[in-house]
């Protein structure tokens, strides 16, 4: 299998080269065979001779029209070659776990480059800046923006900006000045270069590259904060890089003499303009996309296309206005995620996600392969030991110094300080990549006499960081972690207790409002709820968010109550583990009683738009009932019992361990969501159970006053809770943060409706005889437990 | 958010509270703001449902137990002092505190933290974690796939490992001993916002 694909890969490349050669050969009139041809090409050769260049002597039945299709053919062929290379690379998983995929792709690029060079005696295919910046980079960045975990990103925004702006400036300055100093000292011999050119070179080599970072961090699982730091930095530093590059380029053109304070100030101003302007362009396009998807109900089939086109346009528009294109497309992706996911049909959302991944992954593959190919070109190679080695040294050392310095300053202000190991990983993870190469290839040879030297150095830097640092990153992380963690095997008690501690900490954090309670964030949420969602989301999407959150919750309550009733009726809750009968009964029963709840809910939620709730609810009903039973309750009596193994497998992971993993190649799975859902339902069930037992205990008496006596044990709170909004949302698996962002929806407005609504919900569930006796409103106060239920429907996120 | 001093003056016995818990004025103010945010009806006390309104606690397997820990036995409400006192358990331990046997154990010492954790298990407050209590906790922390038999086996094994005096229950001393290698301070501390 491996042999076949390799052969096929080689064959395709041969084919490409030979075809070109052959065509050129026939044009010129002489055929040049500089390498042995596989048999398949031979037949074409004879046809080529017949088709081109000769005057028409009769009708040609079949002609070989190479030039007709040359350009698209080559493009398609190269995409195919890149895809096949990726396939070859992924054949062996043990190899990819040691060497990151990007490094292997570069190696394949070298091989291919070698073949082509051998065939053509020149490098016909290289990574040109135009192709790279216009056709390969945008989709990678759009993918990054669209799948960005927003909450994490924005809560660490301060630190990310510090690293991106100050860190990059620091890197650029130190590398540039360092090299200049060494040049003055004579370490590089005699090259035609100046301070400004060094600074320019420094600025383009300083930037951490998003493509490379993702490619390497994909295999190394680091904690989410660390990941977002490096990743965010790599995305945002484009603002700085663009400015520095343009400024120094302009300075070089002006010549050293023209630079005065005015120019420098203009440079600084241009940074702000470029950065904020770029982001603004992105945000405007995000608004456009959201508005557009609001109206595309009738053309759902091409909805996904709009996202890509508008994303691309945002990139090009920023480029046109000489603003930061990367920032533009990143912010476009970041800002529109939420609204387009809400507005578009579920299938369109899925399409967008998958296509985005395909494009991004494909581009990344092509980029790395071509980075490899571009190297095999003696024309660009200029070797200057001093320059190259010093560059490598400086970027490495100054990156470490910069990160540690900035982290030391930041840690004074951060909630959760960045630890030493994190800092090491962050410094080590400062990978340079194709962006640097693209920038350096754009330099004008006439202004920069040493362009080739710079290109060579950049390539070497890229290879060094991507390959060496990429390969050693994982062992480094493992080694550092192992050094810190205890090596002894934990006892059962310790394992359980550790997990308990995790959950405990998360709970205390929630209670003390460490994370959720933030003035600015609250204000933003309120603003967003009131204005943005109204403006940017389809009315039905808005409604369904509100309704679904409340109604799902009510249904869940009802569901849980019936469930508990069922269990009590059967004598014990052990039947929870018996999936067979309960399943079927429950579903049927649920659907039948579905209509009971409907009128109550409809009555309460009168809004300007009457959305057919039933349609929305039909979607969630299945997931509401089924999920409670879908646990796979296989009996494992036959397996050997192993407590440690069980704990390992089945202890609930705490929220801290839920990873917001941005991955180029995997779309998020639902595992974490299922777990949280399960926990939520169990909590709700247990609360309702105690609530219910309280009420059941009183029901026979049929007297309201007796309810006061019920003092439930404090830990079994008889109050339900507001729903976890992101689960069972019709729009598929959502980012965890979705729920946290929507705290205020519906809560405030419907506050006074709650008691009524709760009441009616109960009516469907609890002993109707009860209801007749209760005088709704004034007994609310007397009956603490009933009053509790309103709280359940309060969807505040406190 | 209110200036520190004006908010502090609203809280009764605030110096005593700070002394006892070791929180700085800024912390106290922060916690007071949080307390007020939770106390929607402005009664000055928190009831179970106020805690219940925090969404994310419902997604925590031991969320309800933690809520329960805030309420002293027999009490239905939590006032600000109790609120802060419980949260004080989670302050990082003061490294430089001199060992003064005459002073009461600070709230955030290792022993106090362990006691808090112990009480989460020991719901009936008899000073021992019985098998049933351990089962309850395990059940809430393990996925639903785990069968009752497996749960019981885990509980049995755990008690076996930790129970030194063979009374089929874990006392506080045994609990403490089983966790002597664990860095409790690290595991049970959060950095409170300024």
Image (cartoon, rainbow, N blue to C red):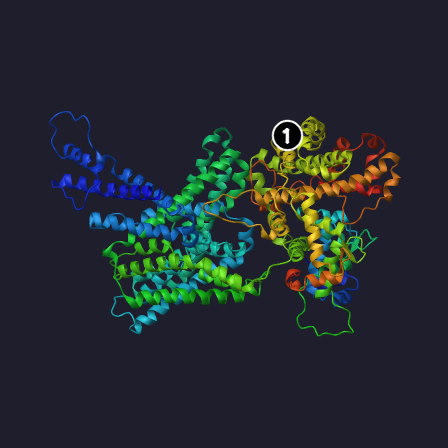
Q: Nearer the viewer, residue B141 or A492?
A: A492
Q: Position of residue A489 (x, y in %)?
A: 60, 59
Q: Secondary structure at mark 1?
A: helix
Number of marks: 1
Q: Position of residue A162 (x, y in %)?
A: 49, 60
Q: Nearer the viewer, residue A44 or A25?
A: A44
Whether residue A499 sits left or right of residue B122 in the image: it is: left
Whether residue A131 sits left or right of residue A281 in the image: it is: left
Report in which chain the residue with disc 1 lies. Answer: A
- Quadrant containing the N terminus of chain A is top left
Q: Nearer the viewer, residue A18 or B156?
A: B156
Q: Residues within 10 Å of mark 1 (few under 14, many from 20)?
A: some
The residue pinned by badge 1 equals A613
Q: Position of residue A614 (x, y in %)?
A: 63, 28
Whether residue A480 sits left or right of residue B83 in the image: it is: left
Q: Position of residue A329 (x, y in %)?
A: 44, 47
Task: Tell me the quarter of the picture where residue A355 sits.
Answer: top left
**Residue A290 seen:** yes
**Residue A261 seen:** no
Residue at the (68%, 50%) spot, across then down: B154
């Amino acid at each position: 299998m491996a042999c076949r694909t390799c052969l096929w890969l080689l064959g395709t490349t041969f084919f490409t080269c030979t075809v070109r050669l052959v065509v050129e050969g026939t044009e010129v009139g002489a055929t040049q065979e500089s390498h042995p041809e596989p048999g398949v090409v031979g037949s074409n050769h004879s046809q080529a001779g017949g088709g081109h260049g000769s005057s028409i002597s009769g009708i040609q039945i079949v002609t070989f029209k190479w030039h007709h299709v040359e350009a698209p053919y080559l493009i398609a062929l190269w995409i195919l070659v890149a895809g096949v290379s990726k396939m070859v690379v992924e054949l062996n998983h043990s190899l990819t776990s040691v060497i990151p995929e990007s490094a292997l792709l570069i190696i394949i690029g070298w091989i291919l480059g070698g073949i082509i060079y051998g065939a053509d005696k020149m490098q016909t295919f290289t990574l040109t800046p135009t192709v790279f910046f216009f056709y390969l980079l945008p989709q990678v960045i759009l993918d990054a923006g669209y799948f960005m975990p927003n909450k994490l990103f924005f809560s660490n925004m301060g630190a990310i900006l510090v690293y991106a702006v100050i860190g990059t400036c620091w890197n650029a300055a130190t590398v540039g000045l360092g090299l200049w100093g060494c040049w003055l000292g004579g370490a590089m011999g005699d090259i035609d270069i100046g301070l400004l050119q060094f600074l320019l070179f420094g600025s383009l080599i300083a930037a951490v590259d998003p493509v490379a970072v993702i490619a390497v961090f994909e295999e190394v699982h680091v904690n989410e904060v660390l990941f977002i730091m490096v990743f965010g930095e790599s995305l945002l530093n484009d603002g700085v890089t663009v400015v520095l590059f343009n400024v120094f380029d302009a300075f070089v053109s002006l010549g050293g003499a023209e630079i005065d304070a005015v120019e420098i100030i203009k440079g600084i101003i241009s940074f702000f303009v470029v950065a904020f302007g770029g982001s603004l362009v992105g945000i405007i396009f995000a608004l456009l996309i959201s508005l557009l998807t609001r109206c595309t109900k009738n053309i759902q089939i091409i909805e996904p296309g709009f996202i890509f086109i508008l994303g691309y346009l945002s990139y090009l528009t920023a480029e046109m206005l000489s603003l930061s294109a990367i920032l533009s497309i990143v912010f476009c992706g970041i800002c529109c995620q939420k609204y387009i996911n809400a507005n578009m049909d579920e299938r369109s959302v899925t399409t967008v996600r998958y296509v985005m991944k395909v494009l991004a992954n494909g581009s990344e593959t092509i980029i790395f392969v071509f980075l490899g190919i571009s190297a095999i070109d003696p024309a660009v190679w200029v070797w200057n030991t001093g320059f190259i080695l010093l560059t490598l040294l400086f970027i490495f050392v100054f990156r470490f110094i910069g990160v540690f310095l900035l982290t030391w300053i930041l840690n004074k202000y951060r909630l959760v300080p960045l630890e030493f190991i994190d800092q090491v990983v962050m410094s080590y993870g400062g990978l340079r990549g194709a962006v640097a190469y693209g920038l350096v290839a754009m330099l004008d040879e006439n202004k920069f006499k040493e362009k080739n030297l710079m290109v060579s150095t950049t390539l070497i830097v890229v290879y060094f960081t991507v390959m060496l640092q990429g390969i050693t990153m994982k062992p480094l992380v493992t080694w550092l972690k192992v050094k810190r963690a205890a090596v002894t095997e934990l006892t059962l008690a310790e394992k359980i207790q550790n997990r308990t501690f995790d959950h405990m900490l998360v709970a205390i954090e929630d209670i003390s409002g460490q994370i959720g309670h933030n003035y600015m964030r609250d204000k933003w949420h309120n603003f967003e709820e009131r204005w943005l969602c109204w403006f940017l989301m389809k009315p039905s999407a808005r409604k369904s968010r509100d309704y679904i959150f409340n109604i799902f919750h009510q249904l869940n309550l009802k569901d849980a109550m019936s469930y508990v009733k069922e269990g009590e009726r059967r004598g014990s809750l052990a039947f929870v583990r018996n999936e067979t009968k309960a399943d079927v009964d429950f579903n049927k029963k649920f659907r039948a009683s579905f209509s009971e709840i409907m009128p109550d809910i409809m009555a309460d939620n009168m809004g300007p738009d009457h959305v057919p709730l039933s349609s929305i609810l039909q979607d969630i009903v299945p997931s509401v009932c089924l999920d409670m039973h879908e646990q796979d309750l296989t009996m494992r009596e036959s397996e050997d019992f192993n407590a440690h193994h069980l704990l390992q497998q089945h202890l609930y992971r705490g929220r801290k361990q839920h990873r917001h993993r941005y991955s180029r190649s995997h779309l998020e799975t639902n595992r974490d969501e299922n777990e949280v859902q399960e926990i939520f339902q169990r909590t709700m069930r247990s609360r309702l159970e105690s609530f219910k037992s309280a009420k059941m205990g009183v029901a026979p008496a049929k007297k309201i006053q007796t309810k006061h006596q019920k003092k439930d044990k404090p830990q079994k709170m008889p109050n339900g809770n507001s729903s976890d909004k992101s689960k069972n949302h019709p729009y598929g698996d959502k980012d965890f943060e979705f729920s946290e962002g929507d705290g205020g929806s519906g809560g405030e407005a419907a506050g006074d409706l709650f008691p009524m609504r709760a009441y009616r919900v109960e009516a469907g569930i609890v002993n109707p005889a009860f209801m007749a006796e209760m005088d709704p409103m004034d007994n609310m106060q007397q009956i603490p437990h009933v009053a509790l239920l309103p709280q359940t429907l309060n969807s505040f996120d406190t | 958010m209110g200036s520190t001093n004006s908010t502090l003056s609203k809280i009764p016995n605030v110096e005593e509270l700070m002394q006892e818990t070791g929180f700085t004025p800024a912390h106290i103010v922060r916690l007071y703001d949080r307390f007020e945010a939770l106390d929607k009806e402005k009664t000055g006390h928190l009831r179970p449902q106020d805690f219940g309104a925090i969404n994310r606690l419902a997604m925590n397997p031991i969320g309800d137990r933690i809520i329960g820990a805030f309420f002293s036995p027999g009490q239905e409400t939590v006032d600000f002092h109790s609120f802060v006192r419980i949260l004080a358990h989670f302050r990082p331990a003061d490294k430089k505190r001199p060992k003064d046997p005459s002073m009461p154990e600070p709230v955030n010492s290792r022993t106090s933290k362990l006691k808090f954790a112990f009480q989460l298990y020991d719901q009936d407050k008899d000073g021992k974690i019985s098998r049933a209590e351990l089962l309850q906790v395990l059940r809430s922390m393990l996925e639903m796939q785990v069968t009752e038999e497996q749960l019981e086996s885990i509980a049995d094994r755990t008690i076996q490992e930790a129970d030194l005096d063979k009374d089929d229950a874990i006392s506080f001393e045994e609990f403490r001993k089983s966790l002597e290698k664990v860095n409790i301070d690290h595991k049970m501390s959060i950095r409170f916002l300024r």
